[in-house]
Image (cartoon, rainbow, N blue to C red):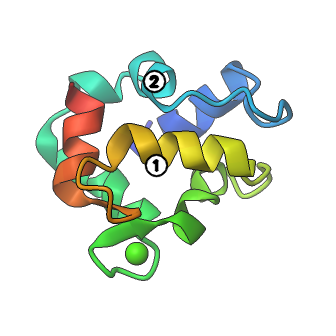
């Protein structure tokens, strides 16, 4: 199973798809094993989330976090998106860079 497929599977198993405000990024990354993946794998996931390849995950892209791995999933709520952003956005520029993403996942 590819890692992206695996992530999609994880989304189902924790029932994140249907329950608003249930998403916790750190918990999810731990649960799906991303925290134990190589920096290259983490970068791959970052690349999927950075849909317009700007080098940053903006708030608009973050909202679709679940959908990137599962097209049938819901979008994140405003609250979930803001929490996600605040966990990762170390320099407070309102978006997540590759290094910030890595630091969040692997910390
Ligand atoms: Ca982007």
Name the residue furthest right.
18
Work out which quarter of the rendered image holds the C terminus and state it. Answer: top left
Mark 2 surroundings within 10 Å by alpha-carbon count, few (fewer than 14), some (14 through 19), many (20 or more): some
Q: Is residue 107 left or right of residue 88?
A: left
Q: Regarding mark 2 in the picture, which secondary structure is present there?
A: loop
Residues marked 1 and 2 touching at CB (< 8 Å): no
Say if residue 42 shows up in the picture: no
Vertical relation: 47 (above or below) 84: below
Vertical placement of 65 versus 37: above or below?
below
Q: Secondary structure at mark 1?
A: helix
Residue located 35% across and 43% down the image: 88
Residue carrying label 2: 32
Looking at the image, is mark 1 or mark 2 earlier in the sequence? Answer: 2
Q: Residue 17: where, in percent of width, then height?
A: 78, 37
Q: Nearer the viewer, residue 25 or 42?
A: 25
Quick one: label 1, few (<14), some, or many (20+) residues within 10 Å?
many
Which mark is nearer the camera, 1 or 2? 1
In the rendered view, does 71 fall on the left or right side of 90?
Answer: right
Picture quadrant where residue 49 is located: bottom left
Read off the residue under disc 1.
85
Q: Which quarter of the image is occupied by the N terminus?
A: top left
Q: Nearer the viewer, residue 50 or 21?
A: 21
């Amino acid at each position: 199973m590819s890692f992206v497929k695996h992530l999609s599977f994880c989304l189902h198993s924790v029932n994140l798809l249907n329950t608003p405000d249930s998403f916790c990024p750190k918990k999810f990354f731990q649960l799906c094993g991303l925290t134990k993946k190589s920096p290259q794998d983490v970068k791959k996931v970052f690349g999927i989330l950075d849909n317009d390849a700007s080098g940053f995950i903006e708030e608009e892209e973050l909202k679709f976090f679940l959908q990137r791995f599962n097209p049938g999933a819901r979008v994140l709520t405003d609250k979930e998106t803001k929490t996600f952003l605040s966990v990762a956005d170390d320099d407070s520029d309102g978006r997540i860079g590759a290094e910030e993403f890595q630091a969040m996942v692997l910390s």
